[in-house]
Image (cartoon, rainbow, N blue to C red):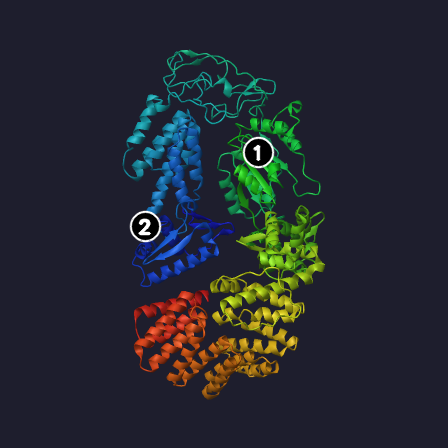
Amino acid sequence: MEFRLLGTVSVDTFTGPLPLGPAKRRSLLAALLLSANTPVSISRLTDSLWDDTPPLHARSVIQGHVSRLRALLVGADAEAYGVELVTLGDAYVLRLPETLLDSQRFEELLTLARGQRSPADAVLMLKEALSLWQGPALSGAFAGRPLQAAAHSLEESRLATVEQLARAYADLGEHNRAAAVLRAEAVAHPMRESLAAALMTALYRAGRQSEALDWFHRTRRLLADELGIDPGHELADAYALILRGDPGPDTGRNAPDGPGTAARGPVRADGSGGDGGSRGGPVGPAGSGTGPVPAARPAADRRTGPDGDTAAGPDDRPADRPAEQPGGRSGGAVGGAGVGAGGGTVGAPSLAPPRPLPVPSLAGEPHPTDLLPRAPRGFQGRAAELAALTRAAAGEAPVCLVTGPAGVGKTALALQWAHRNQAAFPDGRLFADLRGFSDTGEPALIEVLREFLLALGVAPRRVPESVAAAAALFRSLTDRRRLLVVLDNARHSATVRPLLPGGTDCVTLVTSRHRLEGLIASDAARPVPLDVLEPPDSTALLAGVLGEDRVLAEPVAARRLAELCGGLPLALRVTAARLAGRPTWTLAGLADELADERSRLTFLDVDDTGVSTALRLTVQQLPQDAVHQLARLGHHPGSHFDPYTAAALAGTDPVVATAALERLAAAHLVTETGPGRWILHDLVRLYARGMDPEGGPDALIGVLDHYIATALAAADTAEPGGEPCFVLPEDYHRPIAVRDFVDRPAAMHWLAAERDDLALAAVAARTAGFHDRAWRIILLQWPQVVWRVRDSWSPLLELALDSARARDDAYAESRVLNLLGWVLTEEGRTAEAVALLERSPVLARQAGDRLGEATALINLAVVQAEQGELDTALEDCGRAVELAREEQDAHTEMLALQHLARMQLTAQRPHEALESARTALDLGPEHEEIARRVLLLTTSGEARLSLGEEDEGIRLLDLAAEEAENSGYDEGAVRALQALLRVTAEPDYLKRYEQAVRRLTEYG
């Protein structure tokens, strides 16, 4: 997890950025991060979120944003990273390790850089610090005055760091690099005089005097025109330095301008080159220069060719001159005499002894080496990933790791980036397909190294025979070059390491279906994960092959094709290829063909290319336990799975399943969306299902019984003693391990998170004829149904009713009717509820289910009371109390007494209502049955009010509202606060009521 202020305000996780939502929520996060681990008051947050007078409900808005932000962090398992958003009185504090905040890491790197004795080490740290910036600070947030000030301060720190980096380059004598980093910022900040002065000095010391003077005059005119002022002392001093030909503090520091490069002055009129020419001052008649003369380049820094000859480096020439033709020499660099600072001559240095392994020159080649395949055709989207690659390539000797599943377009992305950034690699671009996932097998490393060395000019007879020696020569050859090395389809980290170049200015780009975590650990590889395309990019890819007219003619069918292909570029290209070769086919017709899951993968294969082929090559590299797990996952009826679900599908235990899932995730066959939570791409699911079609029924039974066992455990933890379907199927298979829930919130969270998958499992059970599992899986969600009764449960319960009737099971039908009838009552569908509930007690008696009969009578009584039949309702509810007592079931008795008390209160019998509520409360521990306890306290409070005991009534209602709010039972809070507002106009109650209603509306 990473928090970003240096660019768009965001929270990055392994699964992508958190959806922070509106600008004001980002502003709140920014304000908390700027004061990380320090309380931030409501008033300070208000100033950050509103420029003008804040609205009256500003505090509620802030509380809502805090609540949503806290939920996002909890959902991303922020606690595992030591992150916590805490309320402290009238303030909030975001606690987090400072290493997770980019602005803190930026400051730490600056502090480390200032303490370095070596300018080279300072350069590394400053570049790393600046690489943390991804745009203007605090982007995406509302620019309130405090945040504007903070953004300005951060930007000032960034600009000061750029200037510090330029000074470090100057200390190394690398003035061209200093000028390069300063120019970009000077263009963006044309009236920042310190930047202009530093740029002028860097240009002058790099031998670019005319550019330096031109920059001064441009800045002087801009200051006069825009501000009506003259240049300040920094600009004036820099201008005077250039006119005097003063070398400044760097007289003795004429080190090479980057690896393998000498600092050069302008070419003299008499034709002599930079090493022996005048640095910057005018040339006198005797040839003496008034400016400093760079020292001759040490012989040890020179390159030797294959036969021991001295060769110029790629940058061993003035910036304004092209490279010499093969065999040429940079003028004045070797031999002859140069003009010294005092008019004397400097003799030519002696040649360096040849290196043990001669390194050929790249400077003499008319064109740099380029082994890249052509750029991909029809490339679409991927702007974020291309930008991420650019950021990853900004470090020292970076290794960029593009990972993703088969067919997602890793090679296309790598080649697209490589071709777009050709100018960044003047010494060449190398490419090797390592065939890590191919039927033909991987190439021998020595063959790959041999191809690289030959491409770089090594004579065939000088290529070493061993991998170690060849790799050493490759590193030596690339030590002072700017090369791009693309290693495609790598399978193992060990395959990549010998192919890494040696130069700090070289970039290595690796693509793999595996995560290659070993390469991340050993070589600080920076992963750039690649996911499927978004729908607009998917349809654009189709249009790139088929033509826009054909896609625009059937836009709905095009979107449907993109969805059926799951955004997988390989599948989209195969689909487009099929259509391109058949101009009479319609997009809608092919979409109808692809909609059939049984034949979809067949349609997504052409010749020897397609989704099935790509997946087969990935799967064949897996160990057998992972293959078995993947095959069983194909039969999972839900959308996601955890180790317990995976174990139930495969017939193993969660430990074995977790290990298999980790292997599958490393191969990008499953995707981890959160800690312990995975999903399958639709096309991978279809492929996996075909791997073991005979295992489908066993896998389905295993996962259905897993859901029953886990839902039983969740219901028992959430509402102890309230089990509605304790009779298990006759052929029930208990899973090897069942999830344990530590408390009610954990159980309720699981029921809420798994609701969709539980519904899909029930549908799959019904379709396969496992009706005894279908109704149980649905009914076991009753604690969540009670908690969120108005959350569209009717369709699912109607499916459960169909399954119960399919088995002619009176017990099951009665139980389902009970819950469905109650839900319909709460939804206001009273007539339908009565028709169902009148049958339920009869079915329960037929099945001998006395507790089921009691529950049915309770629900029927509730409907009768709503229809005005209070006497009948009181009688049925009283009978339910008796049945529960006879069965000694405190849970059902408490439920019956709760509704009986409410009916007695409606019948203007507050004494009886109070007695029923008190009896019910005495039946259960206070820390359990939260919803029921809140409703009983509410009824007791209203009864006290009816008896004229206003203070006690308000106290009980306030207690009910507080307990409901603390437990997240918003419906109960609304009921209690409504009752309070009928007797008091206390502003705090009104505010809490509005907040509860808003929570219920937004999240309920």
Residue 226's spot in the image, x, y percent?
31, 39
Q: Is residue 587 visible?
A: no
Q: Residue furthest left?
A: 229
Q: Amino acid at mark 1?
A: Leu
Residue 456's spot in the image, x, y percent?
60, 28
Label 1 – label 2 distance at C-alpha: 47 Å
Q: Are marks 1 and 2 in contact (CB under 8 Å)?
A: no
Q: Is residue 647 left or right of residue 971?
A: right
| Residue underneath mark 1 | 500
For mark 1, give the secondary structure. Answer: loop
Q: Amino acid at mark 2?
A: Pro
Residue 184 in the image: above or below residue 598: above
State which mark lies toward you, 1 or 2: 1
Q: Residue furthest bottom?
A: 871
Please state the total of marks drawn on the protein image.
2
Q: Is residue 618 visible?
A: yes
Residue 496's spot in the image, x, y percent?
60, 37
Residue sitting nearer the eye, 477 or 381: 477
Q: What residue is drawn where x is 34% and y is 46%?
A: 150
For mark 2, give the secondary structure. Answer: helix
Q: Is residue 85 left or right of residue 725?
A: left
Residue 401's spot in the image, x, y percent?
56, 41
Q: What residue is drawn where x is 60% and y is 29%?
A: 471
Residue sitting nearer the eye, 239 or 482: 482
Q: Quadrant of residue 598?
A: bottom right
| Residue underneath mark 2 | 146
Residue 573 in the image: above or below residue 167: below
